[in-house]
Image (tube, rainbow, N blue to C red):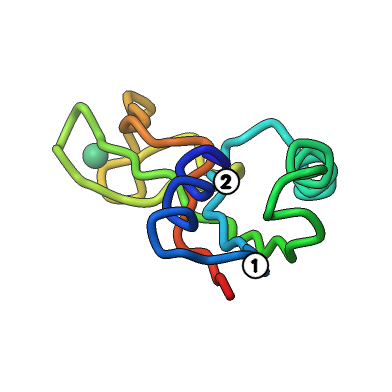
Amino acid sequence: MLKVALEYATKNNASHITQFSVAMSAAADESEESLKFHFEHVTRGTIAEGARVDITRVPVPVKCLECGNDFEWTPELIACPKCASPRIRALPQDEFKLTSIEVE
Ligand SMILES: [Zn+2]
């Protein structure tokens, strides 16, 4: 994820990355704090050192195998809100996704 951002910045002749926006899955095990800590660690010594990290939690898309209903998963949800079937499956989703960066 960081590598993509650095490549982007290099291509655009940016000397500094000042901010990252990251979409984080609601199902990701990692906490926002630990993700920020991880960023601080991996950006040390790069042009992204000291960049701000904004994390947005995004819902997990889920599909009901019974009625085909698409909905968003929350930790409280254990069955389809439409037909009440427990046969629901989370659709593939990145745990973390870089949505934007700011450079200067
Ligand atoms: Zn259903």
Is the residue marked 1 within 8 Å of ligand 1, measured from its CB?
no
Residue 103 pos. (x, y %): 56, 70
Say which element carries label 2.
loop
Left or right: 31 in relation to 84: right
Q: Amino acid at mark 1?
A: Gln
Q: Residues within 10 Å of mark 1 (few under 14, many from 20)?
A: some
Query: Ligand 1 is located in which of the four quadrants?
Result: top left
Residue 71 pos. (x, y %): 31, 50
Q: Which residue is mark 1?
A: 19
Left or right: 66 in relation to 99: left
Q: Are marks 1 and 2 in contact (CB under 8 Å)?
A: no
Q: What residue is rendered at 80% in x and 43% in y?
A: 45
Q: Nearer the viewer, residue 45 or 82?
A: 45
Residue 98 pos. (x, y %): 49, 51
Q: Which mark is residue 77?
A: none
Q: Nearer the viewer, residue 51 or 30?
A: 51
Give the label, 1 or 2, closer to the camera: 1
Say which element carries label 1.
strand
Q: What residue is rendered at 14% in x and 38% in y?
A: 68
Q: What residue is rendered at 57% in x and 41% in y?
A: 2
Q: Which residue is mark 2?
A: 26
Q: Quadrant of the C terminus?
A: bottom right
Q: Nearer the viewer, residue 82 or 45?
A: 45
| Mark pair 1, 2: CA separation | 22 Å
Q: Earlier in the sequence, mark 1 or mark 2?
A: 1
Residue 101 pos. (x, y %): 52, 64
Q: What residue is rendered at 72% in x and 34% in y?
A: 30
